[in-house]
Amino acid sequence: MASWSGSIVRPYIYDPESDPDAQEEAVEVTTFRMIQDVSQWYQCGKCQSMPTEAENCCCQEIAQVQRRLNQLPNPPSCMVDHPGLEPVCLNVYSLQKEFHIYRADYGRLPVRGINQRYRFLSYRSFVSWCWGFLGRRVRVVIPSCVVLRIRAEFPDGQGNYVGFRPPVE
């Protein structure tokens, strides 16, 4: 039997090193979108400009959302036109079921007010539907068009919305 006590594990030894020039280019592209007119970056026709750079993304840019769209024989050009969006993410009875599942898994829901609760659960349902289970503190950006559709269904009376928040380490 071989002894591994003297072996050194060196993960990522064969991975390529990052290219600082490529990182700078990526930063330029992401910051540029905030000053562009929304018609220059959306592809679905239903997105609108959002308050932060991270939130300015179209459903046509996200592979997981594209995969869900392409499951249909005639995929719509926008996720808000997908026939599954309403029953999965906007139907209050489905969201009530999601609420009970959330409470069983995580305890008390950290939001107040029925529309805020439904928005929270609707976002979670959309992510689960497109990405599957991500785990705690793993967050993804939801396309602008979908966020706007959910907000239209479950509006805040004062128009106060949180937007995307990266996970806290």
Image: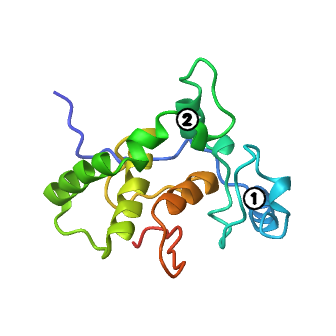
Q: Which mark is residue 82?
A: 2
Q: Is residue 79 left or right of residue 20?
A: left
At which x and y percent is residue 160?
Answer: 52, 79
For the N terminus, give its image quadrant.
Answer: top left
Q: CA distance from mark 2 to mark 1?
A: 31 Å
Camera sees residue 122:
yes
At which x and y percent is residue 146?
Answer: 56, 52
Q: Is residue 95 left or right of residue 145?
A: left
Q: Which residue is mark 1?
A: 26
* Mark 2 or mark 1, whichever is nearer to me: 2
Q: Is residue 57 above or below residue 113?
A: above
| Three-letter amino acid code of the residue under disc 1 | Ala
Camera sees residue 131:
no
Quadrant in the rendering for residue 120:
bottom left
At which x and y percent is residue 98?
Answer: 26, 50
Q: Residue furthest bottom?
A: 158
Q: Is residue 113 left or right of residue 53?
A: left
Q: Which mark is residue 114?
A: none
